[in-house]
Image (cartoon, helix red, strand yellow):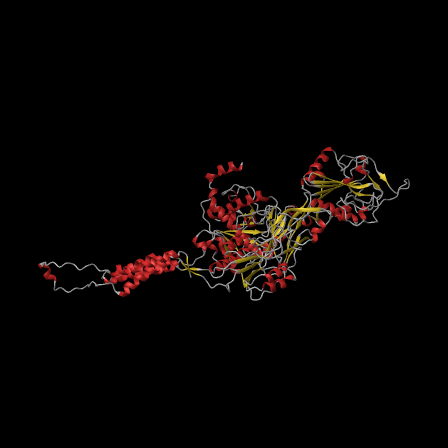
Amino acid sequence: MMFVAPLALLGLLGLPAIFFLLRFNPPPARRVVFPPLALLRDLPIQERTPRRIPLWLLVLRLLAAALIVVGLAGPTLHPPGILSGTGPLLLVIDNGWAAAADWPDRRATASRLIAAAGRDGRGVAILATAGTSSAAPPRIGDVMTADNAMQRIDALQPEPWPSGRAALAEALEAAPETTRIYLADGITDGAGFTTFFHALAPTVILAGAPAPLLVSARLAADRSLVMQTADTRPGDFVLARTASGAVLARAALSPTGGATVALPPALFKQLTALTLGGPATASGTLLLDGSSRTVITGLAAGDGNAEAPFLGGLYFIRRALPANAAPASGDLAALVAAKADMIVLADVPLNAAQSAMARRFIANGGVLVRFAGPLTAAAPDDLSPDPLLGGERHLGGALTWSTLQGLAPFPAASPFFGLPGDASAAISRQILADPTTLLAATVWASLQDGTPLVLGAAIGRGYLVSVLTSANTEWSNLALSGLFPAMLGRLASLAAGAAPQPGLLLSLSAQLTAFGALTPPTTATSLTAGDLTGAPVSPEHPPGLYGNGATTLAFNLGGHVPAPVAAALPNAAPLGNGPPSANLGAWLIAVALLLLAVDLLLSLYRRGLLGLRRLAFLAFLAALLVPPAPAQAQSGALQTTLGYIRTGDPTTDQISADGLGYISADVSAHTAAALDNPVALDPATDDLGLYPLIYWPILPTLPAPGPVACNALKSYMRHGGLLIIDSKGSDAGAAGSGAGFSPGAGAALDRATACLSLPPLQPLGPADVLAHCFYILQDFPGRFVGAPTLIAAPASRDADGVSPVVIGQNDWAGAWARDAIGLPEQLPIPGGEDQRVLADRFGTNLVIYALTGSYKSDQNSVPALLDKLGQ
């Protein structure tokens, strides 16, 4: 036991003074003869005053005083420690990437051990097993005081690379005998772990759970992103995030650790990282670059027969595009407006206005690829990396001296460098570049006679590429060769921002910390794109984004650290703070006050001032002061609360809870309503009548409600409740069985609501009370837009004209949902944050409509409402 304020124990020296004060009696009174008092002499004395205080009462008061003094000194009872021996403590801490997930527990455990060593007067040495960012190998620190060791632990952070335990065995064997405690991350770092562990010979092992590892992500044939983790836990999920941290999608992990994220191509352009749910770590973060990003590729041709089999200008291009290319058709203006990443023009002449538009597109980061042909040969323009000559060059014809030309090896500065040649590729016609102004740096591919075939140059943040032959077989058979798809793949990589050349030197532009945050880089060695593919993560090459301004590659832990292998740690105990220290001061003072209260009661009793009636009165007062235990009740009966129907899908239920929680807080902040946190409901067992609004998300796999649940929902709507049925679907607006819903959503809605006998429905319009009961709205979006929002027809509403049901397919809860720190969990499609604002306003209208009904339909308000609506 220790005392927080040991000097307060000096108060015990006052106990003898208290003893003598309690034992002190005043001198006897002087006797004076007063004759009338003789009449009272023989009266019996009912109450006697003791000559001195009883011993037991004296002990009681002295004990109360001693307890107060000791309690003010702050006695603290510490649990039994795990330290053994008397020498210094060597604290070995794994602080590699696998330790980041439970780092707060790891630091708290280390602080507890150091504090215990300090109480014993023992020195502390600290060994962190991960090397520093300066590539210095880990070493055993000097023995320091507990206070200095505590400061060292407070400053220690996990590193985003593996621990370097294999290099520590020799230093540990030479270290003096100490009490050695190992705070392990639970995994090995290769074959050297066994040698390290035997050299360490830890007295105590405390092990945490290693951080989960996102291994890889790849684009599937359907352009969805397929990812894989090293392991999985029940309830784990993956979030697809933008550069600002906004969530585009959320996918649950399968039991095998896989997940798939499908997004529209326009949103794939905003996707920068995948993160695992839970604590943010480098191992749970997978940075994405152009290799895993969809490239919107615009296609246009100058002739009207562009898609003709084997003849059209786009026929071979469309089939040679890489898997991450999402093709789109249209003229140049339409493709630029569609925000294409790469535009391929097959023999398309451009006028001055179109050339200016194309240059702006390239300067803003686009890639423009132009194939030659008869139309561009007849009407040349100046949109080329180098000036071109008019006319055509014919090779291998009956009236020419030249033969068909194949391709020469690609130069080192070309994006095509490293591609294997194809001897079958032969060029019969081409447009010539002006040799008097030709720059060698712009020649990306040449014929065997040295004539340029592909010219390319960077303009602003994009690239202009001119292929001086046709995209079909009219001028060459390049489109039939295996080289053609590989060349288009390299050009698509330029549009996606990936490295087109294995030999391109890249430096670290943003470093990933152990907690999954991108920060400015520290010192790091530059690597070529090819070397970066196989390099291990290390202090010299930390994870992050490597680039040279125009090209960026993601370098992640997944695939660049050894696969996690559980370490054999005998008798390992879990990390944690252990039993807390008990502060006994408050309890001792409370006991002293209780003893003083007993002393008071006994004193009153001895004086005859505490009879049965007074005891009953005091008991009555005590009963009034003790608050009664609250009766158990549903929270909806105690405060206005929104509800949502539990689906059984953890992701959907969490989104419903977070979405309604945000709307409840928003309504409470901006209106006179005060809403409690939303409640998950089971219609078959819970009392729905306590909730003015119930949100019901419909899933394709959701079974139809049972008879009891159906009867409860029908009774709820019949007696004034507002049921919000939200059939989630990204293909909103398609025709289907569900009154304008997409086919899958309509079928799920029909199955879930078949027993409810829904009233006739009609689309919600701007003139309805729901559209202007708080905010004046014209549209009612959620995370998606396009599907109609349906309410009961006027004849099917209640006496106040309020609809008992609102049905949509816009995923309103997905747009409302915010996480614990207030950040949006999912991105509305396609309007982003502006669409989210409208969704939040519609959520407020729904709550006000459920709470107040149709008071805004009062005829006195109609003129003002019509004036605001512009009608």
**Seen from this angle, which residue lies furthest left?**
35
Q: Is residue 316 left or right of residue 612?
A: right
Q: Residue at x 16, y 64 (%)?
A: 45
**Quadrant of residue 454 within the rendered picture:** top right
Nearer-the-camera pick, 577 or 453 = 577
Q: Quadrant of the N terminus?
A: bottom left
Q: Position of residue 326 (x, y in %)?
A: 70, 47
Total marks shown come to: 0
Nearer-the-camera pick, 405 or 259 = 405
Q: Is residue 463 left or right of residue 776?
A: right
**Seen from this angle, which residue lies furthest bottom?**
571
**Quadrant of residue 57 within the rendered picture:** bottom left
Up the image or down, 471 lies above or below 191; here it is above
Q: Residue at x 59, y 63 (%)?
A: 200
Q: Position of residue 799 (x, y in %)?
A: 47, 48
Q: Quadrant of the C terminus?
A: top right
For the question of whether residue 803 can be seen, the reply is no
**Quadrant of residue 56 within the rendered picture:** bottom left
For the question of whether residue 836 can be seen, the reply is yes
Up the image or down, 580 lies above or below 813; here it is below
Q: Position of residue 138 (x, y in %)?
A: 60, 56
Q: Position of residue 776 (x, y in %)?
A: 52, 41
